[in-house]
Image (cartoon, rainbow, N blue to C red):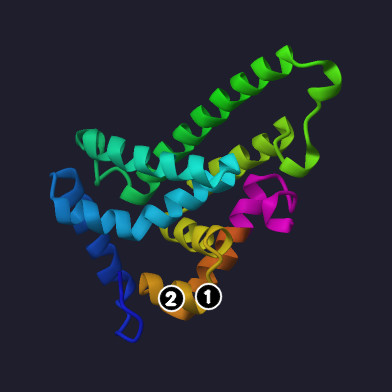
């Protein structure tokens, strides 16, 4: 992580640092694990929260993602993909597992209730369509290049401005804006048009 006010590294330096971090994580270096959590823990939590709609579930998923990633780090190959994408993939599976479990519990509860008490509450946003939309957005995000995905997640899930994203990641402000534009265009294409969470 780059502290605000320091000189931002160029793209080559950034890529080299991320590769070194990924290799350290793969080799079991605890400092690399801590660095990975600092850099992507917020992104994992935000993706889980956005998918499940529950901050407490998102906290549990975040812990599970990093625990499972560390325990199964031998399966991660830095030469085949970046660590952020691998963590995002684990997050997607964990979030979908949580949604599946919640759906089963909800179905069981509703089956035991009178029909008048078993109707979904639209204000909760827990309809199957809402859950499906969240999963589709996660899939589209996972297909983006790592830096575009990180910038979009920090913006939409973390609520950070372009300036704060630049300070947080060390990516130059102009590059942050470029990643945002390209990422949004790719997401809209991946989601079949402007429909989705990015529009409202």
191, above or below 127, in the image: below
- Residue at point 61%, 52% (across, down): 187
**To which quarter of the image does residue 169 belong?**
bottom left
Direction from residue 178 to residue 26 in the image, left or right: left
Residue 110: quadrant of the picture = top right
Residue pointed to by mark 2: 166
Counting from the top left corner in percent of width and height, residue 190 is at 62, 46
Outermost top residue: 112
The residue under the point 50% across, 39% down is 57
Q: Position of residue 177 (x, y in %)?
A: 54, 73
- The magenta region covers 185-200
The secondary element bearing badge 1 is classed as helix
Q: Is residue 199 above or below residue 91?
A: below
* 90 displayed left or right of 191: left
Residue 107 magenta: no
Helix or strand or loop: what does disc 2 sit on? helix
Identified at 43% across, 49% down, the residue is 44
Q: Examine the image and state in which quarter residue 184 appears.
A: bottom right
Circle 1 is placed at which residue position?
Answer: 162
Where does the N terminus fall, quadrant-wise? Answer: bottom left
* Quadrant containing the C terminus in the rendered view: bottom right
Numbered mark located on residue 69 in the image:
none
**Contact between labelled residues 2 and 1, with CB atoms less than 8 Å apart:** yes
Horizontally, is 173 left or right of 127 in the view?
Answer: left
């Amino acid at each position: 992580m780059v502290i605000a006010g320091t000189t931002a590294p160029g793209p080559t330096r950034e890529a080299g640092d991320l590769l070194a971090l990924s290799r350290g994580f793969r080799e079991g270096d605890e400092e690399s694990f801590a660095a990975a959590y600092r850099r992507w823990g917020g992104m994992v939590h935000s993706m889980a929260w956005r998918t499940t709609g529950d901050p407490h579930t998102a906290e549990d998923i975040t812990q599970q993602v990093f625990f499972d990633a560390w325990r199964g780090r031998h399966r991660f190959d830095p030469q085949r993909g970046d660590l952020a994408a691998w963590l995002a993939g684990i997050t997607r599976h964990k979030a979908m597992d949580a949604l599946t479990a919640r759906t089963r519990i909800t179905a069981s509860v509703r089956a035991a209730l009178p029909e008048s008490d078993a109707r979904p509450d639209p204000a909760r946003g827990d309809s199957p369509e809402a859950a499906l939309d969240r999963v589709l957005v996660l899939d589209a995000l996972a297909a983006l290049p790592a830096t575009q995905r990180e910038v979009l997640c920090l913006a939409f899930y973390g609520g950070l401005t372009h300036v704060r994203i630049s300070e947080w990641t060390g990516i130059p402000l102009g590059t942050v804006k470029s990643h945002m534009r390209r990422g949004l265009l790719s997401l809209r294409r991946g989601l079949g048009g402007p429909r989705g969470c990015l529009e409202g």
